[in-house]
Image (cartoon, helix red, strand yellow):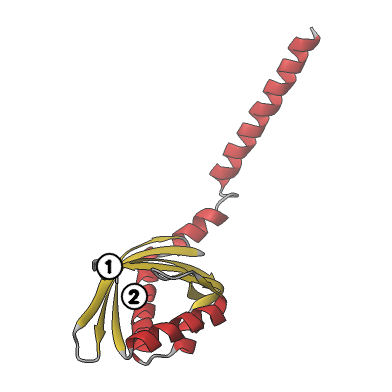
């Protein structure tokens, strides 16, 4: 008898919980998440990312490593090929300084292929082309960037890329 009573209490409690949950959803009590999702427009976010990609390319052309580092979150990280990852704005700035010292003036064009995510974190898949000052293509490849909302702006949280070109011959 005790076991039957316990089973009935558990069943009644579970049924009440489910009924309350369904009623809350139907009455609109749980719409905060839904409203936030509706107000976030992925197409608009992609346009913002595309404009930030143009800014990124302009800063590369100017060899502005401080300006580039400012596009990253405070806990951002860049993971270039054949190099260790660099974290934080000073590490990222140092990485760009090394790149500019090695390549000289370059132009970079970033093309966003697709963007997915939420109002807090976006993933971008894209391609890049890099040319020297004469317009000769020196590299092309692909990248994945995670964008994070920081201080009301989209900033780069993680940045990884690699070349489509074959590796240089061993020495």
Residue 85 is left or right of residue 135, and the answer is right
Residue 128 is left or right of residue 25, and the answer is left
Q: Residues within 10 Å of mark 1 (few under 14, many from 20)?
A: few
SS class, disc 2:
helix
> Where is residue 15 drawn, in percent x and y?
64, 27
- In the rendered image, which quarter contains the N terminus? top right
Give whichever of 38, 3 is nearer the camera: 3
* Residue at figure coordinates x 51%, y 64% from the top left: 120
Q: Which mark is residue 167?
A: 1
* Image height of 6 relative to 35, above or below: above
Q: Which residue is mark 2?
A: 50
Please tell me in which quadrant of the rendered image residue 48 appears. Answer: bottom left
SS class, disc 1:
loop
Whether residue 109 appears in this view of the structure is yes
Mark 2 or 1, closer to the camera: 1
Q: Earlier in the sequence, mark 2 or mark 1?
A: 2
- In the rendered image, which quarter contains the C terminus? bottom left
């Amino acid at each position: 008898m005790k076991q039957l009573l316990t089973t009935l209490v558990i069943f009644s409690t579970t049924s009440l919980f489910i009924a309350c949950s369904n009623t809350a959803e139907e009455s609109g009590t749980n719409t905060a998440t839904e409203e936030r999702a509706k107000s976030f427009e992925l197409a608009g976010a992609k346009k913002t990312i595309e404009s930030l990609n143009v800014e990124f390319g302009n800063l590369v052309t100017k060899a502005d490593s401080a300006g580039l580092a400012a596009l990253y979150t405070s806990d951002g990280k860049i993971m270039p090929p054949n190099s260790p990852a660099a974290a934080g704005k000073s590490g990222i700035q140092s990485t760009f300084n090394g790149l500019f010292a090695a390549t000289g003036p370059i132009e970079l064009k970033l093309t966003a292929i697709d963007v997915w995510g939420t109002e807090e974190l976006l993933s971008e898949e894209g391609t890049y082309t890099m040319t020297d000052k004469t317009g000769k293509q020196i590299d092309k490849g692909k990248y994945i960037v995670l964008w994070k909302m920081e201080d009301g702006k989209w900033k780069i949280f993680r940045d990884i890329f690699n070349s489509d070109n074959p590796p240089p011959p061993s020495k």
